[in-house]
Image (cartoon, helix red, strand yellow):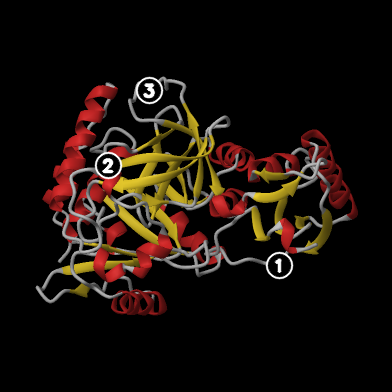
Amino acid sequence: MKPSKWQILKSFFNTRDYTDRAVLEAHQQKQLDRLLTNHNSRFYPHSTKLQDYPVINKRIFMQHFADINAYGISEKDALSVALKAEESRDFSPVFQTTSGKEITVGLSSGTSGNRGIFLVSPEESARWAGYMLKRMLPRPYLARHSIAFFLRANSNLYTAVKSPLIRFEFYDLLDALDVHIQRLNAQNPTILIAPAQVLQQLAQHPDLAIRPKKIISVAEVLELQVKTRIEQRFGTQVHQIYQCTEGFLAHTCAHGNLHLNEDMVYIEKDWIDRESGRFAPVITDFNRESQPVIRYRLDDVLIANDAPCPCGSAFARISAIEGRCDDILDACTTGDEPYALYADFIRRAMISDDLIQEYRVEQHGRALHIFLTPDTEQTRAAATNALDRLWQTLQLRPFDYVFQTEQTRPLHQKRRRVTKISAYSENP
């Protein structure tokens, strides 16, 4: 059973803007009370106090998959449905519960090493679709829109947004980009949604002739220099959606600032570095009933921004989605003290020289493996000089550098500029 168009419209019109923080917090408390009183999970306690619920992560969530979801669906059965869909590239099949309810099953991309599984009912899908449309459609809302969506996998969740006014086209990232250009030109979408690296490649493609009114980056860190290139090519601002298996967490407002969707999720901050504003979000989703998400700690690094936004929203701002906690590199000061080296420091150093167009950095113990495009003596010297200056500025012991040729990477593989393969202490 597909989501009802009336349910989508109801969600669309019920989605409101909050400009008063006290009103927003009253809404959050009401939603928390409803969720904690009515959830049908065997894993969570039945308490009206959020602090009585354990903080969990993906490992715990997957270990207790059958007990967390409301239908007792096993991880094995859900995974079977999802993998068949990925193999066949037909994403319409659903899991049918013993009571006859049809549940959409999807997989995360698994950038952290293990893949998450999400379960969504038609009602939840309708609420998500209506909310997404209200937050991300350009005005006027009743105009016709043609949406091109580049993603690793399609889902009933995404195609729920189809309507007489909205044409939705899925572009499979398992296919080479050139395969899509002719079809994309024929569609000429008003809205283009894709990971940052795909948007960048589309912006550089000589045969692309589209002029989207709105561009939305998803699934990857959107770096400033990449954002600028895309905006220059298409002549329009690049917006962002922060969406993951666990929920739709943030979006950019008309002024291009990221706001947490605090009317949909309650977010506690697990501070990584309070001084710099870095935290990992612990999320509680108000609307997930098939698979409740309560006090789930994500491995993402967000940077808080307390400055008021010109848009007037009461939703909390974040300056950036910086990456993953497990990609904070291990370094050592010149005084032999451990030092947490944030990925953004490496990014800023690498783009400080215009010679470096593309790069990737992996930490292997006390060595940084550096992949450059183009990989020349000049770009290697530029990277060496930029990183050496960084160590001097931060008073860190230098890493060894290992330069390697970058191999062609498939589009469906998320781009992670900076990754930690092994810790500093693991390579004496």
Q: Quadrant of the N terminus?
A: bottom left
Q: Circles 1 and 2: CB distance less than 8 Å?
A: no
Closer to the camera, 335 or 314?
Answer: 335
Q: Is 374 on the left-hand or right-hand side of 77?
A: right
At 80% from the left edge and 33% from the top edge, which residue is drawn? 393
- The residue where tag 3 is placed is 311
Q: Is residue 225 left or right of residue 242?
A: right
Dot 3 or dot 2, earlier in sequence: 2
Q: Is residue 364 visible?
A: no
Circle 1 residue:
407
Q: Are marks 3 and 2 in contact (CB under 8 Å)?
A: no
Q: Quadrant of residue 68?
A: bottom left
Residue drawn at x 70%, y 44% is 339
Residue at screen point 80% across, 62% down = 428
Q: Position of residue 114 (x, y in %)?
A: 48, 68
Q: Secondary structure at mark 3?
A: loop
The residue shown at (57%, 42%) is 230
**Residues packed near mark 2 inside 10 Å, few (<14), some (14 to 19) or many (20 plus):** many
Q: Which residue is mark 2?
A: 264
Q: Residue furthest left?
A: 99
Q: CA distance from mark 1 to mark 2?
A: 40 Å
Q: Secondary structure at mark 1?
A: loop
* x and y percentages locating residue 241 in the rendered image: 42, 44
Closer-to-camera residue (69/163): 69
The Cα atoms of the two marked residues, 3 and 1, are separated by: 43 Å
| Amino acid carrying mark 3 in the image | Cys
Distance from disc 3 to disc 2, alpha carbons, whole Å, reads 19 Å
Q: Earlier in the sequence, mark 1 or mark 2?
A: 2
